[in-house]
DNA sequence: CTAGTCACG
DNA sequence: ACGTACGTGACTAGG
């Protein structure tokens, strides 16, 4: 077996190679050098599926079914394992040929396959978490929640389950508080946006906002995470490579890509992610990655030059599009520009922009028109991509990653418009995913070449997080920054900001 | 199991 | 005139 796995002249295909090599890695055995992962290959061919079970691969690519029953006298687990190996070996060349004819061999072989072992290693290393700090935080929050409950019940004139949107809506009705907005099922909406509006007039709305924030932190993080800390003091979550339709990774069990960072209270959670004694955390994140990619893809001269000149892109937009002049003017217009710059990558319309910025629809319409008048290349892109998707059925990232849009010609306006927005966003988000994966592969390799102990421990879409011995910090930081900034050569520079700290918050 | 909500990029 | 910003995952309530 060992001879087969280490024989360089044999082609070896796996189904879910991260599980295979992760298990080996855990035993201290070097990962197998695999020529194929059929699950990942199927994901690259069509990343829009929810999963890629072996039954599907057999059916779709070999036109066969897996056995409906186990032959007499054969152990079920043994049979299914052999069958999995058989189908994997047979389907691998079929998938390879499809990748080749799609011109996707490089994204598969040079990005996705090398990413697998990097992810396996990251999962194995895990993240150290201060469980006691989280438990203390949870206890503290719980007291505050009880105090808040009492105030809420006093205002409502009765007790109710604050965690139930339905009951919150009922309380609002009893107090004659009009929210205006309804949910998809006709219920009164009590979402954050609605509550912020109501908070202008009603104290209860602000209290519910506060309650929700604290309860979220309590349940999802402060109480959940300590239970997941293993004997080594670390959390070993899963990084999924075949889930997101755009090429991004996803994180589960637990999700470590949505650790709070925005609110002061939430930042306490982030502070509980710490290095081992003698180590520090290094956080490296791309500055404006998606906007830089948008500039590159659209070849918009104005935005491209702004990035080349090292401009503050939002301030630049504020001046060029919205005519900001003096400092005071700039501050407000920069805020608007930032929201528009983000929204553009999601194909925001006047309606969406108006509610986000707090201006009228007519004003929002003018803002978007002015934006496109300045960034003409971006307007062209917004027109071209949906056409491309309608013509080809898919769009692709800079590195050949595809996403299909089967409903982009739907007769239903809403369905069609949604797919058009998804199509507009995909090359941007998809290319960002490509670049970050390339960076992960290259950083990992460079750290190994230099024989450093520094370990990559998390990826959060445009950020890589590392744990490094203190004596390696300078060298590792330089390697990380260099490899991330040179992961792709675009017509605009890629800029990475590196921070070091004794917890995830302070490393920012 | 689905809906509603909210944490992140 | 339609519905209205992309991509995720987890928790709670309620059926
Ligand atoms: Mg960033």
Image (cartoon, coloured by chain):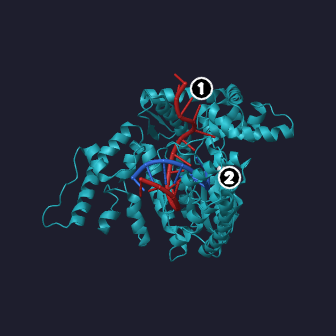
Chain colours: A cyan, B blue, C red
Q: Is residue A259 left or right of residue A426?
A: right
Residue under the image location 41 percent in, 73 percent down: A27
Furthest residue in direction left, as rendered: A72
Residue under the image location 64 percent in, 45 percent down: A194
Q: Confirm whether circles 1 and 2 share one chain.
A: yes
Q: Position of residue A111 (x, y in %)?
A: 48, 49
Q: Is residue A235 above or below residue A49?
A: below
Q: Viewer-proximal residue, A425 or A32?
A: A425
Q: Viewer-proximal residue, A42 or A439?
A: A42
Q: Viewer-proximal residue, A139 or A342?
A: A139
Rate crowding at label 2 as few (under 14), some (14 to 19) or many (20 or more) other CA atoms within 10 Å.
many
Q: Given contact means CB atoms under 8 Å apart, are the residues at marks 1 and 2 in contact?
A: no
Q: Is residue A389 above or below residue A338?
A: above
Q: Which residue is mark 1?
A: A380
- Disc number lying in front (1 or 2): 2
SS of the residue under disc 2: helix
Q: Is residue A4 left or right of residue A129?
A: left
Q: Chain of mark 1?
A: A
Q: Chain of mark 2?
A: A
Rate crowding at label 1 as few (under 14), some (14 to 19) or many (20 or more) other CA atoms within 10 Å.
few
Q: Position of residue A384 (x, y in %)?
A: 54, 26
Q: Is residue A192 above or below residue A228?
A: above
Q: Which residue is mark 2?
A: A205
Question: Whole-Å distance between the Cαs marked 1 and 2?
Answer: 43 Å
Q: Is mark 1 within 8 Å of ligand 1?
A: no
Q: Quarter holding the N terminus of chain A?
A: bottom left
Q: Is residue A374 above or below residue A167?
A: above
Count of numbered marks:
2
Q: Position of residue A255 (x, y in %)?
A: 53, 59
SS of the residue under disc 1: helix
């Amino acid at each position: 077996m060992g001879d087969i796995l280490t024989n360089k002249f044999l082609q070896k295909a796996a189904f879910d190679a991260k599980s295979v090599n992760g298990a080996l890695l855990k035993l201290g055995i070097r990962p197998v050098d695999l020529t194929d992962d059929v699950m990942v290959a199927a994901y690259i061919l069509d990343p829009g599926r929810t999963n890629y079970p072996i039954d599907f691969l057999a059916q779709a690519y070999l036109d066969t079914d897996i056995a409906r029953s186990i032959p007499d006298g054969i152990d079920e687990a043994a049979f299914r394992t052999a069958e999995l190996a058989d189908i994997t070996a047979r389907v691998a060349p079929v998938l390879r040929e499809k990748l080749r004819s799609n011109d996707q061999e490089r994204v598969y072989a040079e990005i996705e396959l090398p990413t697998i072992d990097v992810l396996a290693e990251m999962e194995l290393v895990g993240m150290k978490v201060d469980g006691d700090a989280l438990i203390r935080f949870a206890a503290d929050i719980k007291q505050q929640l009880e105090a808040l409950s009492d105030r809420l019940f006093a205002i409502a004139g009765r007790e109710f389950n604050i965690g139930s949107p339905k009951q919150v809506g009922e309380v609002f009705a009893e107090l004659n508080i009009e929210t205006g907005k309804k949910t998809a099922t006709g219920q009164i909406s009590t979402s954050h946006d609605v509550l912020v509006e109501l908070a202008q007039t009603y104290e209860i709305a602000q209290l519910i906002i506060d309650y929700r924030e604290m309860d979220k932190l309590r349940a999802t993080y402060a109480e959940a995470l300590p239970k997941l800390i293993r004997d080594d003091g670390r959390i070993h979550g899963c990084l999924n490579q075949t889930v997101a339709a755009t090429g991004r990774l996803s994180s589960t069990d637990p999700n470590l890509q949505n650790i709070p960072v925005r609110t002061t209270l939430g930042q306490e959670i982030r502070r509980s992610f710490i290095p081992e004694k003698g180590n520090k955390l290094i956080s490296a994140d791309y500055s404006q990655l998606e906007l830089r990619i948008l500039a590159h893809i659209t070849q918009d001269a104005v935005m491209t030059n702004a990035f080349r000149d090292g401009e503050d892109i939002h301030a630049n937009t504020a001046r060029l599009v919205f005519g900001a002049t003096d400092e005071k003017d700039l501050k407000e217009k920069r805020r608007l520009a930032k929201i528009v710059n983000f929204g553009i990558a999601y194909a925001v319309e006047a309606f969406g922009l108006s509610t986000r910025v707090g201006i009228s629809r007519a004003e929002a319409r003018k803002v978007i028109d002015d934006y496109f008048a300045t960034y003409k290349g971006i307007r062209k892109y917004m027109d071209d991509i949906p056409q491309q998707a309608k013509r080809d059925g898919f769009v692709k990232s800079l590195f050949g990653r595809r996403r299909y849009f089967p409903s982009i010609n739907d007769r239903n306006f809403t369905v069609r418009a949604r797919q058009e927005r998804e199509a507009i966003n995909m090359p941007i988000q998809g290319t960002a995913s490509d670049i970050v994966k390339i960076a992960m592969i290259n950083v990992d390799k460079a750290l190994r070449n230099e024989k450093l102990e520094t370990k990559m421990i998390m990826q959060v879409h445009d950020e890589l997080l590392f744990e490094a011995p203190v004596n390696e910090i300078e060298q590792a930081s330089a390697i990380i920054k260099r490899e991330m900034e040179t992961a792709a050569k675009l017509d605009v520079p890629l800029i990475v900001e590196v921070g070091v700290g004794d917890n995830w918050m302070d490393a920012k």
